[in-house]
Image (cartoon, rainbow, N blue to C red):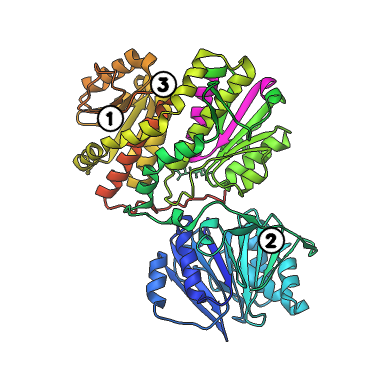
Amino acid sequence: MCGIVGYVGARPVLSVLLDGLKKLEYRGYDSAGVVVLGEDLNLFKKQGKISSLESEISGLSLDGKAGIGHTRWATHGVPNDRNAHPHLDCSGKLAIVHNGIIENYRELKAELIEKGHVFSSDTDTEVVPHLIEEELSKTNDLLKAVLSSVNQLKGSFALAIIHKDFPDKIIAARVESPLVLGIGENENFLASDIPALLPYTKKIIVLENGEIALIEKSKISIFDSQGNQIQKHPKTVDWDARMIEKGGFEHFMLKEIHEQPNVLKETLEGHLDLPRRMVLLPEGPPDDLLRNLETLYITACGTAYHAGLYGKYLIEALTGLPTEVEIGSEFRYRERKFNPKSLGIVISQSGETADTLAALRRLKGEEIPIFSITNVASSSVARESDWVFHTKAGPEVAVASTKAYSAQLLSLVLFALKLSQARSGPFNPRTTELVQELQKLPVLAEATFNLEKNIQAYANRLRLLTDYFMLGRGLDFVTALEGALKLKEISYVHCEAYAAGELKHGPLALITSGKQVCLLATQRSLLPKIHSNFKEVKARGAEVLVLRFPEGEELEGDETLVIPSTSDYLSPLLAIIPLQLFAYYMAKEKGCDIDQPRNLAKSVTVE
Ligand code: M6R
């Protein structure tokens, strides 16, 4: 978490840094700071969002040709001005910004204090400028000093370093935390993520673990952890700057919810062979591998984990292949055995989630090949996988994931169908019917927005809500889990998602008169069962919102939302949209910070 930026070139440095930080604010937003290197180091930092920093320095025009900036998500040290980055060495000539955690900072700090260094923050980060200062006193070569300092650090970090005596240069280093370099014409950039670079360039170099870059306006030189210069070739990204604007919507989240029909269309593009009613998945594992599998291991975190759960239900239903799904933070540490005839499926929007990456590496350590589903083609997950499905959601800016989730679900449908084709041949009526249904999805998703006004009114009516329940069976349970996560993370309403059949094993005790419940009823084969659950909660006085297909008329709630009819297997792709809208409008009713909810950050690149 945290976002870092850097710039060397002739543009007004301060505004390039602030602009870049705003594009990265989703990564952390409890304090921010910049340093511009002119005659001196001009340093500004402030608790709060980037707008607080901006109002403090608005109108300043600083001469300088290089600078670095930071937006923070606090780990070590409370969010305040002192702990905000950049941090300086004792001489005040060297400044650094850092994303990640320095795990051995206590030992290093003790040694540095012993040597006379004076610290002025509670952060783990501050050991780095003092360590480099110490090394610099031995060599007077900034690159060498950074290299030997970095080799003493343990943990995860992306660093950008600037020094008054080495003007017009930035040194950047990466171990685990992401760092991308942007290449311009006589100007160069660095950032934690691609959106900060898009207004200036689409030519990027992704720094790998252990690499160090010396960034000057006319060139970038890259070195390995031993200091040997290496050659890396830039890539061109297919995102553009318009994709990271709000496009007339009040919040990124609402824009991203509304982008879903198009995301489904883009993700399907090139993957359907309609005449033969087959899916094509050229980016996936080959058929002979798919045919010989005995197990699948899916791992992911948060919303991507819910997509994984959907994958498990669907894959097992369509192919019978036993599929395990586990949260990355649990999977990485579990003591267990693995089936060697297996495939790992790793799902991550950002492709940089620390626990997901660790789970991926755990699988690789067991020599299990990896198929990943990610929205960022240049991400660590993508680079470390054997096969990558690049979801075409475009940059997702709101912290709450919406369109990336839909793209992940759809990717898993394509994978499940491909698996079924490889294992039992292409002419299975269940799968060929699904292929037909898939092409209708973008239009059906668009039609769910007809419910938006009703959902807004429902949220207005429930604006004082503190507790909520979402219940469903089968794939509706998966949708309930994801809907509940959305409600919790952006509207701070405590919401419990339950497999409706579990209700009577405990949670039913919570259902009393006036309790608000959403009952999902899109699994046709389970309708009689869900009807019983409806009766159970109604009998205890709950008010029920029913979400169903047109053909479930016997289930009328106190409110009913009817989504367009599709296959039960595909219903999660439509049913989630009203729940995302409900979370959005609840958060709006409550005046919450929708795109940047409290305590969260978009990419969780620390453990
Ligand atoms: O980038 P990833 O998909 O790996 O992120 C995983 C989770 O951190 C993410 O889905 C998180 O749960 C979102 N805030 C949910 O909206």
Q: Secondary structure at mark 3?
A: loop
Nearest to N terminus: mark 2 or mark 1 = 2
469 vs 71, left or right, is: left
Residue of label 2: 153
Does the magenta stretch mainly form a helix, a strand or a loop? Answer: helix
Identify residue type, mark 3.
Ser
Residue of label 3: 567
* Residue lying farthest to the bottom in this orientation: 39
Residue of label 1: 517
Q: CA distance from mark 1 to mark 3?
A: 24 Å
Q: Nearer the viewer, mark 2 or mark 1?
A: 1
- Dot 3, crowdedness within 10 Å: few (<14), some or many (≥20)? some
Question: 239 or 209, which is in the foreground?
Answer: 239
Q: Quadrant of residue 596?
A: bottom left
Q: Nearer the viewer, mark 1 or mark 3?
A: 3
Residue placed at 71% from the left, 69% from the top?
146
Instruction: Count the labels in the image.
Output: 3
Question: 498 or 231, which is in the foreground?
Answer: 231
Residue 22 on the magenta span: no
Identify residue type, mark 2.
Leu
Q: Position of residue 185 (x, y in %)?
A: 61, 70
- Dot 2, crowdedness within 10 Å: few (<14), some or many (≥20)? some
402 vs 145, left or right, is: left
275 vs 80, left or right, is: right
Nearest to N terminus: mark 3 or mark 2 = 2
Q: Is residue 387 above or below residue 66?
A: above
Residue 296 on the magenta span: yes
- Residue 180 at least partly seen: yes
Residue placed at 51% from the left, 24% from the top?
274
Q: CA distance from mark 3 to mark 2?
A: 53 Å
Highlighted magenta segment, given as a residue range: 290-317
Q: Is residue 560 above or below residue 63?
A: above
